Amino acid sequence: MIIILKPNVTDQEVNDLILKIKNEYPVDIHLSKGHNTTIVGLVGDTTQIDMENLVLNKIVDSVKRIQEPYKKANRKMHTDDTVINVGGNLIGGNYFQVIAGPCAVESEEQLLTTAKAVKAAGANFLRGGAFKPRTSPYAFQGLKADGIELLKKARALTRQPIVTEITNIMHLPLFDDIDVIQVGTRNMQNFELLKELGHCNKPILLKRGMSSTIEELLMSAEYIMSGGNEQIILCERGIRTFETALRNTLDLSAVSFLKRITHLPVFVDPSHATGKRELIAPMAKAAVAAGADGLLIEVHNDPAHALCDGPQSLTCEDFAILMQSLSQYAKLENKIMQ
């Protein structure tokens, strides 16, 4: 349920209303102050709340029930776009960011070379997998804790915030100094992990499950937000369909739809979505046109010899070319590439 307040209400009037609601009903309160509208969201069992009684309050303009199961992620609850600040780099709203780097951290030389290249091309965030969940148990599983240390070393060199994926709740202490924690497609519905991330004061990049609906993605975000962490970045990375020509089917319609129904930033991963490096550039441009707030792109200094996902990784040179063209597309969509 949301309570839309009248313009020019005072902080004291809002606090008095919130206190009254808390004393009368067992619900959590979510206050959202937008540019033009102040909304009081009620999360919990609202079936016993008398809407007509609330409307009688002098500062209340209207009261509406939210039918969707996701409450905190719902744009009805929070009308303005959420903007997340990561070391001075803004994500969401009118800002457009690119997270780039290798699928997996393989060596110090590989990571530092790639980090410097993506930084020079204009990417403000460095990605790299230290823990790699792979379909085959015989495939490269990542450098684990050593990979995280290399990511920190790259950050010290390039001053880029680092993004890496968590695969096990037991590894959480290793992520204390990570700037953005990524939850991969296989863990999107690892609810115990999501609950723990709800207690972290860190941005979470939440990837859509390969066979998950949009509502399921938002409910996973709700798990994290219900724990108190509202710094969520949603990521469309392609879904599994009957089509076999590409690794996945990139659902760009989901991007535009998500921007309508949620206030959270929405990124697109064209690398995993297609699995083919020659399709990354056109899909990245299409993602900007669809309204995405950013991109997650795999870049490797030597894709032919990559230990993980070489065919879907751009070379450093091709990434630089893509970044030049993306700046023009972002301007067309009134997005700011910092």
Image: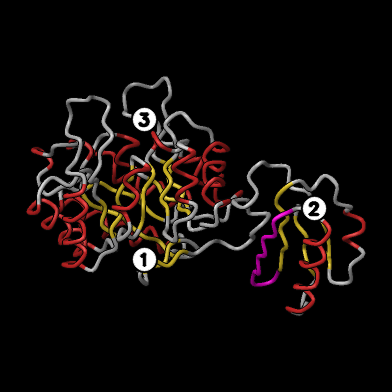
* Secondary structure mostly taken by the magenta-highlighted segment of the chain: strand
Which of the two marks, 2 or 3, is nearer to us in this view? 2
CA distance separating discs 1 and 3: 28 Å
Q: Which residues are magenta?
A: 27-37
State the separation of the CA atoms marked 2 and 1: 37 Å
* Mark identifier at residue 337: 1
From the top left corner, tell me how far across and down residue 20 is, in percent. Answer: 82, 66
Q: Is residue 168 above or below residue 98?
A: above
Which amino acid type is marked by label 1?
Answer: Met
What label does residue 64 carry, if any? Answer: 2
Residue type, mark 2 in image:
Lys
Q: Residue at x 23, y 24 (%)?
A: 136
- Kindly state the secondary structure of the residue where label 3 is placed: loop
User: To which residue does mark 3 refer?
Assistant: 248
Please tell me whether residue 228 is drawn above or below residue 45 in the rendered image.
below
Mark 3, other Cα within 10 Å: few <14 / some 14–19 / many ≥20 = many
Question: Which residue is pictured at 32% across the width and 34% down the height?
Answer: 274
Q: Earlier in the sequence, mark 1 or mark 3?
A: 3
Q: Nearer the viewer, residue 175 or 326?
A: 175
Q: In the rendered image, which quarter is residue 12 located in?
A: bottom right
Out of 56 and 265, give the one closest to the viewer.
56
Report the amino acid beneath label 3.
Asn
The colour style of the image is secondary structure
Q: Which quadrant of the view contains residue 126?
A: bottom left
